[in-house]
Each structure stands twice: as structure tokens, then as C-alpha cells.
Amino acid sequence: MAVSTDLKDRLIEAMPNLRAFAISLCGTSDRADDLVQETLVKAWNKIDSFEDGTNLKAWLFTILRNTYFSQYRKGRRELADTDGEYSSRLSVQPQQQGHIDVQDLSAALNELPDDQREALVLVAAEGFSYEQAAEISDCAVGTIKSRVSRARTRLAEIMQLDADDSFSGDQYGNTVLVAGDPIARG
């Protein structure tokens, strides 16, 4: 359907009233201008559904009101995160890399001598103190400390890790390789 010049003029004439209504709904002139623009675009795209002789102003106000409330409902479900700060806190490390790291660590642990692997697992993975691990292994505390130190050094060599390397978010692998007391790096 061809749009008559009269209908175009009536659309333009309705703009101030639409803007006033939009400001009353959303409170700011910037948002109101956007709302009026979207209303007019929707009305223009659906102009074929408008019946001559009916109230154009009421039709436009209905479109504006429905558009506003649609945006309002959508806005309540969404979070404004223009700088990406919130979404960056939601990210997690990919699990597949952590799984691969655990497999690599397991294979490297199997290459250690039994006494070193036992000491390292007791102290670093199971969380026993050096004293408790020494009692479990029936040896001196100094022996356990030495075995744990040698095991960590050897694991780092086997896995070709530098001092700055760490596993991708796997707390257990980091615990095993951290020198000194078995405290997981976060």
C-alpha cells in the first residue's frame, strides 16, 4: 500500500506528543528520543496494518507503550556490563586443560621412585605434616623432607616446568610442585 502524504504528515505531527509520553514513561530525554524513534520505525514497517479512519495517535501510543514495556522487561533480565568487569569475573578456566595437566602429572608421578612418590603424595596431596608423613613411612622427618624436595625437583624436570610455570587452574598439581610447605597456590 502506498503511504499517503497526509499519513506521513500525521506521523510527523504526532512526534512531540509521542516524545512527551515517552519522557513520562522512561524519565530521560535521551531514552525517550530512542523510544520514539523505535516506535516510528515499527509503525512505518507496519503501516499496512493501520486502517484509515481509525485513531493514528492511539495506534502510535500503543506501539510506544508496548515497546517501552518490552524493553523494561528485557532490561530486568539483563545486566549492564559496559566495561566487561562483571562478565570477566564469571569466566572459568577450561576444564579440558586441567584434565590434561592431571594426566601429565599422574604420568610424571609414576616415573618417580616409590619412596619419593609416597612422601610427595602424603605431604603435598594428602596434606599430612612432615612429622605425620615420617611416622606413616617409618622414617625420620629429615628423610621425608629430603624425599619431598627431590620428588618436586624431579617432577619439574620430567614435566619440563620452570619456576614460573603452573598448571591451568589445577590446585592439586600446583600443590605438589610448590617448594616448601604444601600450600596450594590459588
Image: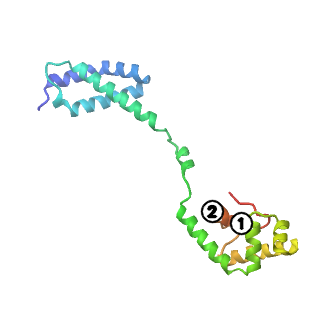
Question: Which mark lies nearer to you, 1 or 2?
Answer: 1
User: Could you tell me residue 182's position as x and y percent?
Assistant: 76, 63
Label 1: element kind: helix
The image quadrant that residue 173 belongs to is bottom right
Q: Is residue 178 visible?
A: no
The quadrant the N terminus occupies is: top left
User: Could you tell me residue 12's position as x and y percent?
Assistant: 24, 23
Label 2, on which residue?
170
Relative horizontal placement of residue 119, taking residue 19 as reference (left or right): right
Label 2: element kind: loop
Cα separation between marks 1 and 2 = 12 Å
Q: Is residue 141 visible?
A: yes
User: Could you tell me residue 29's position as x and y percent?
Assistant: 41, 24
Of 71 and 6, nearer the camera is 71
Sequence-wise, which precedes: disc 1 or disc 2? 1
Relative horizontal placement of residue 131, taking residue 110 as reference (left or right): right
- Is the Cβ of the residue at disc 1 closer than 8 Å to that at disc 2? no
- The numbered mark at residue 26 is none
User: Could you tell me residue 109's position as x and y percent?
Assistant: 67, 76
The image quadrant that residue 93 belongs to is bottom right
Rate crowding at label 2 as few (under 14), some (14 to 19) or many (20 or more) other CA atoms within 10 Å.
some
The quadrant the C terminus occupies is: bottom right
* Residue drawn at x 15%, y 22% as measured from the top left: 6
The image quadrant that residue 138 belongs to is bottom right
* Residue drawn at x 68%, y 66% as measured from the top left: 164
Label 1, on which residue?
125
Q: Is residue 94 above or below residue 105?
A: above
Of 29 and 103, nearer the camera is 103
Relative horizontal placement of residue 121, taking residue 42 as reference (left or right): right
* Residue drawn at x 73%, y 70% as measured from the top left: 121
Residue at the left extreme? 1
